[in-house]
Image (cartoon, rainbow, N blue to C red):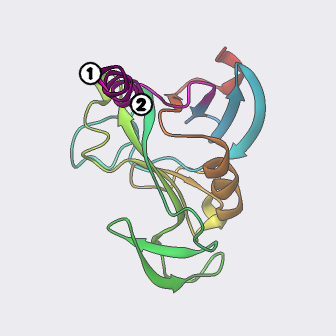
């Protein structure tokens, strides 16, 4: 009984340490692109859109934070492409690509947590990697701090990476990042 209880306690403790340590997302604000690696090898590359307000982590700045982050929460698994989220909850509305006059968070949300002092506010600022109906703006800075992706791309990313996956946001070109 004691041995079984000890094993259960150890499993609970270790489960908090579990996470996706194989995947890394490198986001270049210069290139407006994301490279995804598994065990250090590139497996995908996607166009993205970072902030039109520049770079930083000051609350209220609407800037994209730089540095080392990780995926803290994943929201929206199984939702249809274009599903609208408000306060991280699906509204039931589904928007087509480039829906006029609309700019909500759609499809999937990967909520990021800062791992350094320079991006410590990221989680509280609700910095996400998420889908956007404004796919015409992918490839240019157009967000309010988040990393926007096409719905089809963010679904693939969501299905590839797990909680704890590392994210590195840099102002350098992708070619300059190992």
Q: Is residue 67 visible?
A: no
Against 61, residue 9 (above or below) is: above
Magenta stretch holds residue 97: no
Neighbor class of circle 2 (other Cα within 10 Å; few <14, some 14-19, many 20+) is: few
Query: Front-most of 174 and 122?
Result: 122
C-beta proximity under 8 Å, tags 1 and 2: no
- Residue lying farthest to the front in this orientation: 1
Where does the image place residue 176, in percent across and percent down from the top left?
Answer: 67, 16
- What element does badge 1 sit on? helix
Tell me if mark 1 has few (under 14), some (14-19) or many (20+) residues whose alpha carbon lies within 10 angstroms of its own: few
Quarter location, residue 136:
bottom right
Q: Is residue 10 in the magenta section?
A: yes
Read off the residue under disc 2: 15
Q: Which residues are magenta?
A: 1-24
Which residue matches tag 1? 117
Pinpoint residue 110: horizontal percent, then vertical percent.
48, 49
Observer-side mark, 1 or 2, equals: 2
Quick one: 73 or 133, which is closer to the camera?
A: 73
Residue 142 — which label?
Answer: none
Label 2: element kind: helix
Compared with 122, 156 (above or below) is: below
Could you tell me which residue is drawn at 36 percent across and 44 percent down? 63
Residue 29 percent coordinates (x, y)? 55, 36
Residue nearer the viewer, 3 or 162: 3
Q: Residue at x 24, y 45 (%)?
A: 124
Task: Give the residue at x 70% y 52%.
Answer: 156
* Badge 1 or badge 2: first in the primary sequence: 2
What residue lies at 49% left-to-right and 82% top-to-bottom? 101
């Amino acid at each position: 009984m004691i041995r079984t209880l000890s094993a259960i306690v150890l499993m609970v403790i270790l489960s908090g340490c579990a996470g996706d340590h194989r995947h890394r997302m490198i986001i270049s604000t210069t290139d407006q692109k994301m490279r995804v690696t598994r065990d250090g090898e590139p497996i995908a590359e996607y166009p993205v859109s970072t902030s039109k307000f520049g770079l930083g982590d000051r609350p209220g700045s609407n800037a994209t934070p730089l540095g080392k982050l990780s995926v803290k929460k994943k929201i929206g698994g199984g939702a249809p492409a274009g599903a609208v989220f408000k306060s991280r909850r699906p509204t039931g509305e589904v928007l087509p690509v480039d829906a006029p006059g609309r700019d909500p968070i759609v499809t999937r949300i990967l909520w990021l947590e800062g791992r350094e002092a320079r991006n410590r506010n990221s989680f509280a600022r609700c910095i996400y990697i998420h889908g956007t109906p404004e796919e015409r703006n992918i490839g240019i800075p157009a967000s309010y701090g988040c990393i926007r992706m096409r719905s089809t791309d963010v679904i693939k990313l969501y299905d590839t990476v797990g909680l704890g996956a590392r994210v590195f946001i840099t102002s350098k070109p992708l070619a300059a990042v190992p």
